[in-house]
Image (tube, rainbow, N blue to C red):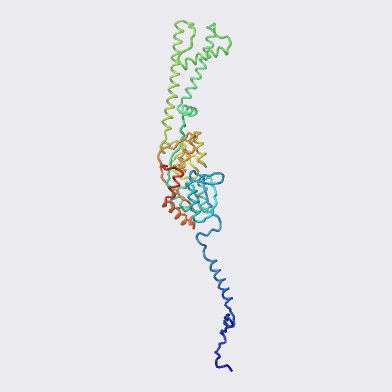
Amino acid sequence: MPSPQSHTISKFEKVTHKGDIATELVGHRIITAPNFAILLAYVLLAFLAILPPPSNAQTQPLTIGVLASPPFVIGNDGKFTGLAIDLWEEIATKKGWEFEYQEYKTFRELIEATSSAQVDLAMTSLTITQQRALKVDFTQPWFDGGMRLMINTEQGTGFRGIIKGLAQAGFITAYAWIAFVIIFATALLTFFDRRFDKSFPVRWRDGVAESFYTVMSVVTSGRPPSRKNLFGWLGRIWQALWLVCGVAVLAFVTSSVTSVMTTLAITNQINSVDDLAGRTVAVLTGSVEEDYAREKGLAVRSYTSLNAAVAALTNDEVTAIIADAPVLEYYAHKNSELPVKVVGRIFEHDKYGFALPLHSPLSREVTLAVLGAVDNGRVEELKTRYFGANP
């Protein structure tokens, strides 16, 4: 029989106290407080595991695609510097991002690698266009650019250029006939003097040389060397006719060369795209300039690097290079020994930005960082570093 101080305990629930440990009997199962704490810890860990990682969490270095385009990206033995590189590295340092560079040879390869998420971000003198924006995300623009022309300052003025101009004008054929007449006159004069001039050299080679010298004297100066008059007044008339022919040939050659050089000087004055009709231009593979030149109907040759394009320009393989204005200006400044210069005004104004794969989780953070660098004047400081105070 229970004592009066006892409490009624149900079949399924009983609470007792023994020291500092509380024991609950629930449905005949015992759960102690320490066991409950362990169970709660497991639940908390499972909950944390399914949460998305923080936005700045990084499990592996970012892959940054680059394309050498001084002064924006300057490659040197696998290391990179430049305006775009400096801007990115400052952003990455502030964000605590680790990264590694992956170099690409053409704009097309760089855009495709970004579109397929082979790289986390792409940088160079990368123009923002609608066509590209369908494949990749762009940050806010951080540089205003455009297109300009680079030409060869010695184009058409060398010997090869003059010969080419004479051939195009049809003068080479006339020169060939003049050469034939000179050879024929040399042979005729040799036979004539051997028959009638007793003092003429006996050996054939000496005689031919003497006759050739006489003919060329008439052709190049209009004056024959002193010769005996073997036929009186008829001989003088014959010599006079020779002088007239020589003066005519000399005048023809001089005027034709002068006219060709004048024409070359006029036609080689290139200051805008309108002056490039019917001529071959160089562009960089996969660049917006390549698309622009083809849309304009120009004859285009694509090159993987600006160095290759400049080599073609100096070898007269192309008439001009169409490329980004700041890139051409920087190249001409750094390679002042080359016979090239940048001409005309900037056309087709555009803007540069960083590119990321579509819907990249980094797009917002990088864009905000770029806006901050533009707003606080850091981008202008970098421009001054690479282009000077008055670019």
- Specify whether 266 is left or right of 43: left
83 or 300: which is nearer to us?
83
Depicted 293 relative to depicted 51: above or below: above
Direction bottom: furthest residue: 1
Image location (x, y in percent) of residue 283: 48, 41
Residue 129 at least partly seen: no
Q: Please identify the quadrant where the C terminus is shown.
A: top left
**Quarter where residue 6 is shown:** bottom right
User: Residue furthest toward the front?
Assistant: 19
- Expressed as whole percent of the image width and height from the top left, the position of residue 188 reads 52, 13
Query: Could you tell whether 13 is left or right of 250 in the image?
Result: right
Q: Which of 301 and 16 lies nearest the eye of the viewer?
A: 16
- Quadrant of the drawing holding the N terminus: bottom right
Q: Is residue 388 visible?
A: yes
The spot of residue 171 in percent (x, y) is 46, 24
The residue at 59%/80% (across/down) is: 30
- Which of 241 and 290 lies nearest the eye of the viewer? 290
13 in relation to 68, above or below: below
How many marks are shown on the rendered structure? 0
Indicate the position of residue 7 as horizontal and vertical percent values: 54, 89
